[in-house]
Amino acid sequence: MKTFEFIRPADAGAAITTAAQAKTAQQGAEVRYIAGGTTLLDLMKLNVETPGRLLDINRLPLDKIETTADGGLKIGATVRNSDLANHATVRRDYAVLSQAILAGASTQLRNMATTAGNLLQRTRCAYFRDTAMPCNKREPGTGCPAITGSNRTLAVLGTSEHCIATNPSDMCIAMAALEATIHVQGPKGSRAIPFGEFHLLPGNTPHRETVLEPGDLITHVTLPPPRSGSKQVYLKLRDRASYEFALASAAVVITVAGGTVTRARVALGGVGTKPWRSPEAEAALVGQVASAPSFRKAAEAAMAGAKPQTENAFKIELAKRCLTHALQMAATS
Ligand SMILES: Cc1cc2nc3c(=O)[nH]c(=O)nc-3n(C[C@H](O)[C@H](O)[C@H](O)COP(=O)(O)OP(=O)(O)OC[C@H]3O[C@@H](n4cnc5c(N)ncnc54)[C@H](O)[C@@H]3O)c2cc1C
Ligand code: SF4
């Protein structure tokens, strides 16, 4: 492994100034923030990431969960996944987020993993993590062996001829359904990024995964005020019951009045190249009777644009059943 310099910046400004010296904030960045380290250190051991400088952000004051003036929630970038999932307000008002986080990884990992680190976790595509193999995401222009190779766990939504890697996060799927906003401080100031605009589709630049630029530090995430009476469920389907990434998952936040769905927010995991919000499913649900046939129709709408790879056509039906069941669970909860 390449040697690196480990720095503990005194404040966010110092961290941003140093990180801004990198040429990119994407794959191959020479400077990286390090939070829990559960993604970054793995990739450094594999030589997939080889930063020359690591900026430890764990001492910056970004570890609070607070109520906002409008009644929403502000979640600091270095809040540990365990603390977020078990926070009383999150369990009560944003249950889908708590459920999603607790469905991921292991207790030990969640105790280290942070909010911002989770937003930026990398794909588990085996070729990406193996430097003996070509991979457009790791080394642009080298090709995508997954398209003709091992792709059982990879994406069916949002793929391109250059990359079919799945975004593996559970937390992000709940945040997409909750319409979170990501707050970033960078060399040019602060900005707020709606969740759906943060992650990028692979297109012909799969090495660019987010809109982050050199120096950009995620400071916190906000959630809008909870909708009273909304029902929330995160359902994750995987090869084994724990410590495994999703083959398909669904985050649903729905409101039902008099037996009719009046509001719906739906996002899917395990099937998309980015956390996959489904406006198609949401439109199919609103105004319909909260019943199994309309839930199935919404699931059909969500997966209408899916493109199977050689080994993962099963994910399309799996995702439909996952979403249908999640909606049923929410409606009857
Ligand atoms: C064995 C294993 C199993 C797992 N299973 C699951 C699972 O089932 N579901 C799931 O969702 N996840 C799973 N994960 C992934 C885990 O959730 C992530 O590794 C974790 O959330 C990353 O957070 P971190 O704080 O450790 O990130 P780090 O490794 O510290 O950082 C990750 C990336 O984010 C950047 N970064 C960190 N903080 C900031 C910031 N404030 N601003 C800008 N950039 C920043 C870093 O530079 C780095 O590029 C698993 C991980 C492992 C190792
Ligand atoms: S799917 Fe993406 S990450 Fe996997 S080998 Fe192809 S380019 Fe690389």
Image (tube, grey):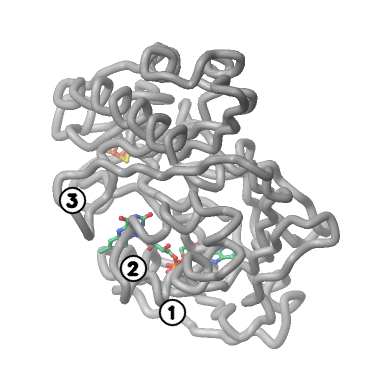
Residue 218, how many percent across, how many down?
A: 65, 61
Kind of residue sitting beneath label 1: Phe
Displayed-image quarter of ligand 1? bottom left
Mark 2 Cα-neighbour bin, 10 Å: few <14, some 14–19, many ≥20: some
Residue name at image x 54 percent, y 22 percent = 259
Q: Quadrant of residue 20?
A: bottom right
Kind of residue sitting beneath label 3: Ala
Residue name at image x 24 percent, y 27 percent = 318
Mark 3 Cα-neighbour bin, 10 Å: few <14, some 14–19, many ≥20: few
Residue position for label 2: 44
Which numbered disc flags the more N-terminal residue, 2 or 1?
Answer: 1
Residue name at image x 36 percent, y 47 percent = 168
Residue position for label 3: 132
Secondary element at image label 1: loop
Mark drawn on residue 61: none
Residue 31, how many percent across, how many down?
A: 54, 68
Residue 294, how many percent across, how many down?
A: 44, 14
Which numbered disc flags the more N-terminal residue, 2 or 3?
Answer: 2
Secondary element at image label 2: helix
- Can you say which quadrant of the picture contains the C terminus? top left
Disc 2 + disc 1, Cβ < 8 Å: yes
How far apart in space, not on screen, are marks 2 and 1 (Cα)? 10 Å
- Can you say which quadrant of the picture contains the N terminus? bottom left
How far apart in space, not on screen, are marks 3 and 1 (Cα)? 22 Å
Which numbered disc flags the more N-terminal residue, 3 or 1?
Answer: 1
Name the one closer to the observer, 133 or 82.
Answer: 82
Q: Please identify, in this view, whether the residue under mark 2 or under mark 1 is nearer the observer.
A: 2
Residue position for label 1: 4
How far apart in space, not on screen, are marks 2 and 3 (Cα)? 15 Å
Number of numbered markers: 3
Q: Is residue 36 left or right of residue 314?
A: right
Q: Please identify, in this view, whether the residue under mark 2 or under mark 3 is nearer the observer.
A: 2
